[in-house]
Amino acid sequence: MKCIRRAMSSIPQYDTRLLKVKPESIIFSKNGSLPQITDKETESNLQQASNELKLLNVIGFPTETVYGLGGSALSDQSVQSIYKAKNRPADNPLIVHISSIQQLKSKLLPQDYEIPPIYEKLIAKFWPGPLTILLPNDPKNSPISSYVTGNQDTFAVRMPQHPVARAIIAISDLPLAAPSANSSTKPSPTLAKHVMHDLQGKIPLVVDGGSCNIGVESTVVDGLSSPPMLLRPGGISLEEIKSVGGPEWENIQIYKKTGGVEENEKVKTPGMKYKHYSPNAKVILFINCGDGLKAMQDYIEKHKLNPQNIALLKSKQFKDLENISIIKNLGFKGEEISQNLFKYLREVDELEIEYIFVEGIDETNEGLAIMNRLNKAAVDVVYM
């Protein structure tokens, strides 16, 4: 594989434009490859975004999970620009985003190749949507840039549900490699202003389609292995995969849930190896700590912390701790917590506090993906 260094030189400087669009004005027919767009400004701005992609530049755009930083998955130049803008490690592969099954077959797969039947039910239910699957890749003959796959024999692909993302991909007719549109290791962006905060001046434009409604990245599954593997929990729960996938998915395994990844080990998909989702403040994760009052107070006393330098993100059981004035309620339901997690991590971090206390939740349904992100963000975990 060609060598990419994490810290790349000669990053272009841009006067980053913020282009607003109306997602509700974008309509895809059931079998249509191109959308109908009823709002003229939205149509114009989507065309501008498409033109940047055709020039092999990269852009920020909304998906239903988080905002993505997209560039042509078929171009080494575009994918290199993604790594440069994010300062992303070179051995952290990217997910390819498509607008249709037809685009997947015509642009990315060998002629007459059939998608493995094990994915059939999952695709029928969850595409378009926050599900990523692994498919075979021939590094010597693949049209996909080796920078996307790490020169490996598989690639990860999904069809986003967000009409803006899907429209940009369809109009440009380019499958897009697109990690989250943040500086590497920082919390993923769920609003356009998060992208501007991290990447302004590093990319030509950001398409503002409002808030992401899921708030964590896609679920990644590997149906090519036996048994199938859950490589990254995300917007589709493990329970949904088992229920919809049928008997072939009943014994799905969670990849290295209790173990780490070796430094030189190749990984097949993002989120499996490096530190992620971390604000500047230190995240302290509390698990099975009841109402949290004793656990938080003990931690403050043990480490001699100033409560005025602490923010609390609570959800189902935690109570407000006296002297902590910055308190955010993530929500009670899993989908609410998922939507709010990255947004509130960023929001309280901007207040320049030193610590963020976060209440952990059960690892069921949306909780598996939420706890996956929190465990990666945390510098310390407290159990009781």
Image: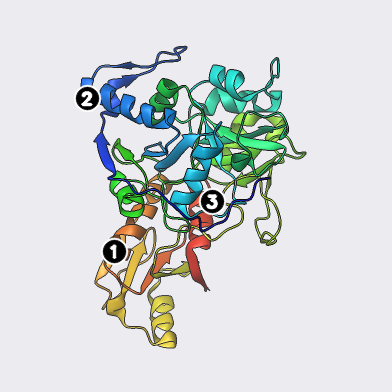
- Which residue carries the number 2 mark? 41
What residue is drawn where x is 54% and y is 25%? 125
Question: Helix, strand, or loop for circle 1?
Answer: loop
Q: In which image quadrant can residue 330 be found? A: bottom left
Question: Helix, strand, or loop for circle 2?
Answer: helix
Q: Are marks 2 and 1 in contact (CB under 8 Å)?
A: no
Q: Are marks 1 and 3 in contact (CB under 8 Å)?
A: no
- Which residue carries the number 3 mark? 368
Label 2 amino acid?
Glu
Bin the neighbour count of mark 3 within 10 Å (Cα to Cα): few under 14, some 14-19, many 20 and up.
many
Nearer-N-terminus badge (1/3): 1
Above or below, 35 relative to 303 = above
What residue is drawn where x is 38% and y is 54%? 342
Nearer-N-terminus badge (3/2): 2
**Residue 252, visible in the rendered structure:** yes
- Which residue carries the number 1 mark? 350
Camera-near label (1 vs 3) is 1
Where residue 167 sits: x, y (%)? 39, 24
Residue sticking out furthest to the right: 226
Above or below, 85 relative to 40 = below
